[in-house]
Amino acid sequence: MWPLFALVLGLLVGSFLNVVIHRLPKGESIVFPPSRCPHCGHRLGPVDLVPVLSYLVLGGRCRYCHRPISHRYPLVEALTGGLFLLTSLFYPPSLETLLVFAFLGLLVALAFIDLDTYELPDGLTYGLLFLGLLSAYLLSFPRPFVEALDGALLAAGALALIAGYGGLFLRRFREGRAEVPVGPHQVHMAALFGTLLGPGVGMALAFLTWALSGRTGKAVVLPDRVTLPLLPLFLLLSPLLGGDFLEALKGTLLAAGGLALAGGLYWALRPSPPETEEEPVAMGYGDVKLLGALGAWLGLYAFLGLFLGVFAGALLGLLLRQRKIPFGPYLALGGVVAFFFGETLWRAYMAWLGL
Ligand SMILES: [Zn+2]
């Protein structure tokens, strides 16, 4: 009975996610008004809204105006139903399982909103992050709080630095405009200081320049052309300076991740962001926030999720020959695979290496 219940619940949640995916980016209410046909505007009744079945029975057309309905709707419903069914095979009915359902539902919404708009709404990425941290704190599920927090910061820090180096290459090593009071410059500074002095001091120094920038209205930062090239140098030198390479790397990523997620939260909560010209960057911080959120659920397996996402994205990008592809759906896919099969995949890989 449990798998059947999970499947039906997933189909219904999927139906709700369709509304979220459709309305959230436009800033419309998710609860009201009730669903209508996008073509004729006829209000849809319960019979029209049975997940997947209505679509099949009506032949993929509106009951009232007979114009075609996007196959996206039954797809999202079936996908969510399938994911909940998969969950029921791993977990018994429990509070923890409800949290897994929330994790999966948020990822489905994020993936499809990114496909439509090339954006990952902060409400959903930070919702996913804080739900993961809260669950880890209160229930030690899916992993202990320290692992969840480390996973979030390390993963976000790694992707923020990848984006930093990508941006510097794309600008052909010209200095990018520094955002006031906080932007990628602080993230790169936190990383550099974190390498040398540990994550706490690294973050504290970057927060100090954030405060100074806010105070003076000018960016009080070190240029990227200084911080980013010095960073690998200091990392490689750390064993010679009596440190430990892995500790130094951990300090780098934790500090960068802390600044990236805190800075992102600042911009998300800011009432009216000023109109700014977009800089060419390799990757928006939306992906950084999403990977950080995955880290809160997956711990270090978030890196496996990232690897799988990059692999799937590159493969499909090559096959479809698309130039601009949103990365969020691939990250979400990698995250789901790593959540259910991460340990299995890792053990199989180790066995294959003969370790
Ligand atoms: Zn219609």
Image (cartoon, rainbow, N blue to C red):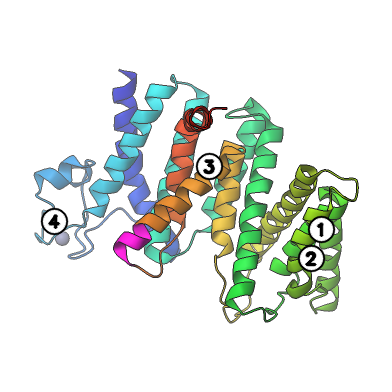
Query: What span is in magenta?
Result: 316-321
Position of 159 relative to 244 (above/below): below
Percent from the top left, x then y, of residue 15?
31, 45
Q: Are marks 2 and 1 in contact (CB under 8 Å)?
A: yes
Label 1 element class: helix
The quarter holding residue 27 reads bottom left
The answer to whether mark 4 is within 8 Å of ligand 1 is yes
Q: Which mark is first along the chain, 3 or 2?
A: 2
* Labelled disc at residue 234: 1
Q: Main secondary structure of the magenta part?
A: helix
Between circles 2 and 3, the one closer to the viewer is 2
Q: Tell me the quadrant of the picture where the C terminus can be found.
A: top right
Q: CA distance from mark 1 to mark 3?
A: 26 Å
Residues at badges 1 and 3 in contact (C-beta under 8 Å)? no
Residue 106 visible from this viewpoint: no
Residue under numbered circle 2: 230
Question: Which SS class for mark 3?
Answer: helix
Q: Please tell me whether mark 3 or mark 4 is closer to you in this view.
A: 3
Amino acid under disc 2: Leu
